[in-house]
Each structure stands twice: as structure tokens, then as C-alpha cells.
């Protein structure tokens, strides 16, 4: 009988302990659920505010808000050209900056003939280190530059192991992807501060959110651009300067020409024109955005994936793409 009593007492103690832990787990579960629901609601609202509401309302007068001229680097092809055209469509005069004079002349002429804006261009090869910047600074000296789009960027052809890249490619990526954004911003920023208005748009990449094997130097350069943009925004927001980091996923441009599937428009791969149209509408609304609503979903998912899973899946996919690129190269 005594043994039965002891067992009953033990059972009651265990039950009380279990009830306490069950209640604690229920509280933790409820807190986690509420937190996720709030986060989802906030993300949904942010997406609507960035990618739906601006399309429904009237367009912002960018000239009045920021200034008469926009400088766009890497502007003879792809996203840069599309950005220049989209800004011109909204009445902003365009200064194109790229290395190919013939292409610059053609794009400049096309924009000025299509839209009621003035255009100009500056020939500059950003892979030449410090060489192009004195001429750029002189050319922009008396311009009312209200918007700078640091778009110019290069990739190392196809996914590749870091040790297989040449030193020339490494320096080119550093000069074009990192130094150009820093130096172009430095050139126009003083004028913007004096006027107490201006916008700087830096094109980063979804690769900035997680380590991406076989795109190591490219991803690192885009991480720099993203960090640089976000820090600069906090540094100069009080002075009337808006700095935006765009973190797109794949866009159908020459940058991904090494793979026929990636270089064609699809459900998650917009054309450069489609991307630019969406991205420009987010200017002044978000300091960090993918610029395109489908890419925003992808970026959010990528950020929340475990690092090991992102790195592993990226390595697998990039290895396949690399193999395809090398096979095509041999042919």
C-alpha cells in the first residue's frame, strides 16, 4: 500500500512538472507564431507599398524632388540603359557613362529623340583604376546632378573557383564593381549636400545576402556595395540625400549570357526594361529593396535560409552551370 501511495505522489509531481513545461512551451509557441505573423504582415505591407501602390498612384516628379540631371554608369546595355530610358521617360536629363563611344552616341541619340530630355555622355573605362575620374569630375562640375545610378558591374564570365580566376579579372572586378561606386558617389555627393537633395542608387545583388560559392569575388563586391549604400544612407539622410541599395536576382542581360536559360526572360527573370520600370518606382521609398516584387520574394526567402543550405545549394547549382559553360566554351 505504501508503494502505491509513493507512486501516486510521484505521478502527481510529474504531472505538475509536465503541465508547467507544457504551458511554457505553449507560451513560446504562441510568441513564435505571433512574431512570424507580424513579420509576414509587415513584409506583405512593405511589398504592397513598394511594388503595387506606386503603380496605382501618380508618378513622383523626380526632377522636382532630386534635380535636373541623372548620371547612369554602364548605360549602353542592359539594366543601365533601361534605367536611363526609364528616368528619361520621367523627364530627367541623362548623362551616360560607359567605355564605348559609339554605343554612347547611339544610346544618347536614341533617348533624346524618343523623350523630351537633354542627353550627354562621358567616355570612361572603369577598369583603369584612378584614371577616368578626373575627367568625369570635370565633366560634371557645373551640372545639377540629382540622381546617380551606379550600375556598372562585371562578372567573371561564369561560375568559377576563385583560384582559377586571373589576377586581371580580380582587379577588374575590384575597380569596376567596388571602386566605381565609391568614386562616382564621392564626385557627386558634395554637390547634392550643398543643394540638400539628391538620390544615389547602387546596384548590388541577391548574392550579398548569403555567401555564394563559385561567385565569391563577385558576391563579395556586391556585399560591399550593399553595405556602402546602407551606411551612406544613414550618414546623409539628414542632409536630404536618399541612398538606395538594389539587390536584384537574375535579370535577362549580357551579364548572364554564359547560360541560355538565365539570359532569357521568364517568370522570375525580368527583362532589363521590366526591372528598371519597377525599380525606379521604388526610389525614395526604400533604402534597400530587390527592386522587383518577384525578386523581393526570392530575397526574403534567401535571407531566411540557413547559411549552410544556401551555400550547399548554390555550390550544386553553380557547379552545373559552370560545367555547361565550360562545355559550350569547348564547342
Image: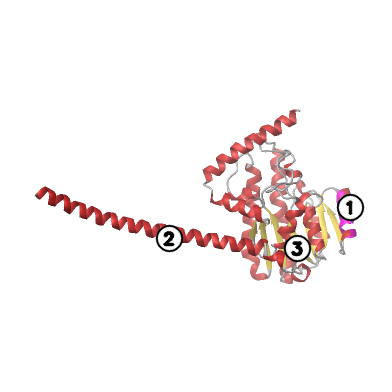
- Mark closer to the observer (2, 3): 2
The residue that appears at 69% across and 33% down in the rendered structure is: 324
On the image, the x and y values in percent for residue 93 come to 83, 63
Q: Alpha carbon of mark 3 to alpha carbon of mark 1: how far? A: 21 Å
The residue that appears at 17% across and 52% down in the rendered structure is: 8
Relative to residue 27, is residue 239 depicted above or below? below
**Image side of residue 211 versus residue 149, left or right:** left
Looking at the picture, tell me which residue is in the foreground, 155 or 291. 291
**Residue found at the far left of this picture:** 1
Q: Quadrant of the C terminus?
A: top right
State which tag comes first along the sequence, 3 or 1. 1
Label 2: how many Cα within 10 Å (few below 14, some 14–19, many 20+): few
**Image side of residue 20 versus residue 328, left or right:** left
**Residue 9 badge:** none
Label 2 with label 3: CB-CB less than 8 Å: no
Q: Which residue is mark 1?
A: 105
Q: Alpha carbon of mark 2 to alpha carbon of mark 1: how far? A: 59 Å
Q: Which residue is mark 2?
A: 31
**What is the secondary structure assignment of the residue under circle 3?**
strand
On the image, the x and y values in percent for residue 13 come to 21, 55
The residue that appears at 78% across and 54% down in the rendered structure is: 82
**Residue 147 badge:** 3
Q: Which residues are magenta?
A: 103-113
On the image, the x and y values in percent for residue 272 come to 76, 51
Looking at the picture, tell me which residue is in the foreground, 179 or 63. 63
Amino acid at each position: 500500500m505504501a508503494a502505491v501511495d509513493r507512486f501516486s505522489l510521484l505521478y502527481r509531481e510529474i504531472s505538475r512538472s509536465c503541465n508547467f513545461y507544457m504551458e511554457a512551451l505553449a507560451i513560446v509557441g504562441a510568441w513564435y507564431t505571433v512574431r512570424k505573423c507580424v513579420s509576414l504582415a509587415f513584409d506583405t505591407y512593405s511589398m504592397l507599398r513598394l511594388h503595387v501602390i506606386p503603380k496605382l498612384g501618380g508618378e513622383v516628379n523626380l526632377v522636382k524632388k532630386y534635380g535636373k540631371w541623372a548620371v547612369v554608369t554602364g548605360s549602353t546595355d542592359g539594366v543601365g540603359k533601361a534605367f536611363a530610358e526609364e528616368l528619361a521617360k520621367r523627364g530627367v536629363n541623362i548623362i551616360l557613362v560607359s567605355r564605348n563611344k559609339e554605343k554612347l552616341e547611339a544610346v544618347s541619340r536614341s533617348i533624346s529623340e524618343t523623350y523630351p530630355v537633354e542627353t550627354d555622355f562621358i567616355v570612361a573605362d572603369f577598369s583603369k583604376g584612378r584614371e577616368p575620374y578626373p575627367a568625369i569630375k570635370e565633366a560634371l562640375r557645373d551640372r545639377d546632378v540629382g540622381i546617380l545610378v551606379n550600375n556598372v558591374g562585371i562578372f567573371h564570365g561564369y561560375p568559377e573557383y576563385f583560384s582559377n580566376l586571373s589576377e586581371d579579372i580580380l582587379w577588374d572586378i575590384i575597380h569596376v564593381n567596388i571602386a566605381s561606386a565609391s568614386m562616382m558617389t564621392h564626385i557627386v555627393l558634395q554637390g547634392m549636400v550643398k543643394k540638400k537633395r539628391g538620390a544615389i542608387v547602387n546596384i548590388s545583388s541577391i548574392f550579398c545576402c548569403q555567401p555564394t560559392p563559385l561567385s565569391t569575388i563577385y558576391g563579395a563586391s556586391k556585399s560591399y556595395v550593399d553595405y556602402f549604400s546602407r551606411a551612406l544612407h544613414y550618414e546623409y539622410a539628414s542632409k536630404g540625400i536618399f541612398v538606395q541599395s538594389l539587390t536584384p536576382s537574375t535579370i535577362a542581360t549580357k551579364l548572364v549570357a554564359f547560360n541560355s536559360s538565365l539570359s532569357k526572360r521568364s517568370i522570375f527573370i525580368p527583362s532589363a526594361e521590366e526591372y528598371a520600370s519597377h525599380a525606379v518606382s521604388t526610389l525614395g521609398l526604400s533604402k534597400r529593396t530587390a527592386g522587383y516584387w518577384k525578386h523581393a520574394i526570392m530575397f526574403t526567402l534567401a535571407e531566411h535560409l540557413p547559411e549552410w543550405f544556401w551555400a550547399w545549394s548554390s555550390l550544386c547549382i553553380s557547379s552545373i552551370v559552370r560545367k555547361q559553360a565550360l562545355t559550350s566554351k569547348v564547342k
